[in-house]
Every structure is written in C-alpha cells, then in structure tokens.
Image: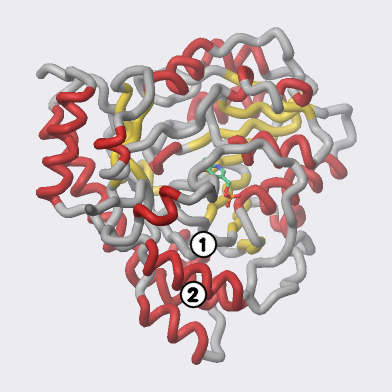
C-alpha cells in the first residue's frame, strides 16, 4: 500500500554523487547571487544562525533590550533560538484567515525592551512586512525575516528574507531546498554578520548518507516503514540545547548542486497548490498577496479540529505545530508576557491541516487528496 511523505525530501541523485566527487564549493556564492545579496553566513541549521544573530545583537545593544517578538504560531525552534540566546520570548498574535501578524497585538507587545521582531512567511506564503517595519523603526528594534520555508518566494519582486534588516533560511527536510541540514543568514549590516559564521567541524558524511537514505525510504512503497517506527517523525519539540556549528562541507556542496532544481520544485509546489485551490474551492485556503510568488512547502487549509484520519495521513496530510507558542507548557517559562493570550494562533493550531506539495505528488493524486479532504472535513463549495 502506498504511503506518501508529508514534506519535500527530493534532491537529485546526481547532486549526491557530484557532491562526493567535486572539489569546488560555491554554495555561498550561488545563494548570494540567487537572493541578490552581497553576503551571507552559513550554519548547521536555521535555528543556529538565528541564535547567532540574536546573541550578537544582544551583545551589541547598549540599552536593556532583552525581548524578542515572535509570531504566536511558529516553529518551536524559533522560540528555542531566543531562549538559547538568553532572551525572553514575547509573542504576538496571527490572523488565522491570512497567517499575517495582528497589528494591534504586535503594537501592544512592542516596547523599549524589544531587541528584535521576527516576521515569518509560513509555508513560503509571502506576508507583507510594511506594518512590521514601521513598528520596528518606531521601537528601535531589528526586523528579522524568518524565510526558513521561503527560499525562492518573492514579494513585489524582492526575494523573501531580504526585505527586513536580517533574514534566515533553513535547508532541513521539508524546506524549499531540502538538503537535510543547514541554514543561512543574510543581512544589510555586514558589521553584524562578519565573524559570525561558525567553524565547519564536519565533512558531513553522516548527513550525506542520511540524505541518500531519505530519498530511498520516502518512496511510496517504503514510506510506511518510518511511519510505523517510533522515530518521532515530524514531532515538534522545544529544545534550546541544539548544536551550533558550521554547515557541513558535503551539505554545502549538495545544496550547491541541488539549487539547479529549486525553481522547478517551487513551480511544481505552486501548481499543486493551484490544483488544491481549484478542487477544494473553499474559503478555508490562505490568500496570497497580489504581486507575490509563494513557495508552498505545503498547502495550508483551515479545515477544522480533531485527529487526522489515517486514510488522509497515508496521503501526507498532517497538522503543523501542535500548539500556539504561548500555550506550550515547555515554552511558558521563557515567555516575557506570561499572561498573554493569542486566540488567532490557538485557532490556527487547532484547525490547520497541510496537504503535500512535493515532487512525489502528481496533479491527479492532488485531486484525489483534495476529494478525500473535502469528504473528511465536510467542505462544501
Ligand atoms: C518557520 C520556521 N522557522 C525556523 C525553522 C528552523 O529551521 P531549522 O530546522 O533549520 O533549525 C523552521 C524549521 O523547522 C521553520 O519551519
């Protein structure tokens, strides 16, 4: 029986072999050219480069700014980076209809203690940064764009991640460029970034073997195996004790070779998102701003609460993060605003499901998945 992974794992086999054979390593240059930026630093994950950034901003700040504003519904790793940097997490709410920041909540949360504001493009769906820029300027905070899922997306012609003061990307499984590990940080202020890149301490053979094994195990005839094993696949945990290191050399080479298919992967994702939208024809889909090119690492749908039926799980349908940041017990001790309520974020955590958009899903399969989702969640046109 076929099982489909929920997120992208595809990288070309030729890239895996080439990265072993090739002596060149121009990933940084390729990435900077692609993003039209002058400079970037690489690390072993998105959370690692975010942590390094927050750490240096904290050290450089001469006032007593000790809080970072993060979206009420986001990856727990973002909260983990803030905690690891010894800063307090302050959450702002998200509009469940658009996944955009709630401006009132943002204004209420921002203060003279705000060191940085993290803005995100969840699923690589661009969200306007203008309102946040204004609030960041007004409070004197740094604006950090979380484009972990947004490599290849644009808003008004600008690559996601390059519109704020700083932006970061992830190359983990399920991201736009799913090398299996790695992260990049870009920024306007080179003084902040210079000297920040951690030392590369591993060639990355383990990561390369894992990337190759992931290709094999994600085949629909085999994917039931990791799903049945207690591997904690897709589990979201808050862990500020993560490793911070350079991006392994082989992972850099793999990323460089895989960049050739990035736009093709993103075109496929957008095509499936369009297929889902047309097939579902529902208001539960998240709107995309005019003048933007989304990525759609997955297709989000606010369909309703409850456990996802096994039949849909088999087709890669999953929930995302289980709780709003403010409602997660393990994160609560790190919150600057303990009494905060983020009803929009809580609604997203309850109701959001995601449909797969990766290369293993064909257009016909996407139509079949949409039909199954329609029946399971009683979605009417
Ligand atoms: C929205 C978002 N931000 C940050 C991260 C952190 O990236 P990484 O897993 O590379 O640390 C992720 C990845 O899971 C993410 O999805």
Can residue 145 be seen here? yes
Task: Indicate whether 240 appears above or below 169.
Answer: above
Counting from the top left corner in percent of width and height, residue 65 is at: 82, 28
Residue located 23% across and 41% down the image: 273
Image-based side of 273 in relation to 239, left or right? left
Q: Check disc 2 and report the residue beneath it.
A: 254
Percent coordinates x, y for residue 371 in the rendering: 13, 33
Residue 254 or 236: which is nearer the viewer?
236
Question: First in sequence: mark 2 or mark 1?
Answer: 1
Residue 259 in the image, given as x and y percentages of width and height: 40, 69
- Which disc is residue 180 wearing? 1
Q: CA distance from mark 2 to mark 1?
A: 10 Å
Quadrant of the rendered image containing residue 277: top left
83 is higher (above) or lower (below) than 72 = below
Q: Is residue 63 left or right of residue 97?
A: right
Q: Residue sitting at 48 percent across and 29 percent down?
A: 130
């Amino acid at each position: 029986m076929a099982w489909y992974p929920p997120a992208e794992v595809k990288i070309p086999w030729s890239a895996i072999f080439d990265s072993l054979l090739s002596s060149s390593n121009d990933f940084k240059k390729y990435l900077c050219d692609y993003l039209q930026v002058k400079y970037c630093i690489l690390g072993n994950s998105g959370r690692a480069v975010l942590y390094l950034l927050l750490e240096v901003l904290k050290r450089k700040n001469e006032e007593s700014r000790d809080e970072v504003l993060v979206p009420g519904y986001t990856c727990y790793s973002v909260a983990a980076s803030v905690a690891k940097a010894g800063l307090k997490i302050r959450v702002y709410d998200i509009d469940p209809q658009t996944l955009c920041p709630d401006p009132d909540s943002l204004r209420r949360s921002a203060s003279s203690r705000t060191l940085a504001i993290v803005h995100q493009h969840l699923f690589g769906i661009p969200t306007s940064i203008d309102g946040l820029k204004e609030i960041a300027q007004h409070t004197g905070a740094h604006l950090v764009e979380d484009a972990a899922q947004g490599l290849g997306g644009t808003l008004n012609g600008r690559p996601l991640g390059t519109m704020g003061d700083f932006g970061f990307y992830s190359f983990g499984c399920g991201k736009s460029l799913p090398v299996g590990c790695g992260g990049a940080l870009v920024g306007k202020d080179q003084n902040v970034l210079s000297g920040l890149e951690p030392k590369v301490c591993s060639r990355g053979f383990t990561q390369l073997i894992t990337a190759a094994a992931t290709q094999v195990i994600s085949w629909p005839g085999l994917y039931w195996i990791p799903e049945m094993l207690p591997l904690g696949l897709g589990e979201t945990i808050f862990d500020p004790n993560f490793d911070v290191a350079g991006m392994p050399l082989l992972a850099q080479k793999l990323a460089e070779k895989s960049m050739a298919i990035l736009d093709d992967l993103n075109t496929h994702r957008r095509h499936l998102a369009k297929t889902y939208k047309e097939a579902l024809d529902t208001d539960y889909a998240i709107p995309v701003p005019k003048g933007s090119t989304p990525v759609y690492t997955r297709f989000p749908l606010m369909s309703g609460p409850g456990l996802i039926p096994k039949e849909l799980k088999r087709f890669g349908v999953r929930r995302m993060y289980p709780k709003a940041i403010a409602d997660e017990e393990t994160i609560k001790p790190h919150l600057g605003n303990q009494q905060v309520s983020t009803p929009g974020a809580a609604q997203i955590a309850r109701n959001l499901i995601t449909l797969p958009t990766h290369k293993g899903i064909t257009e016909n399969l996407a139509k079949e998945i949409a039909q199954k989702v329609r029946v399971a969640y009683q979605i009417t046109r």
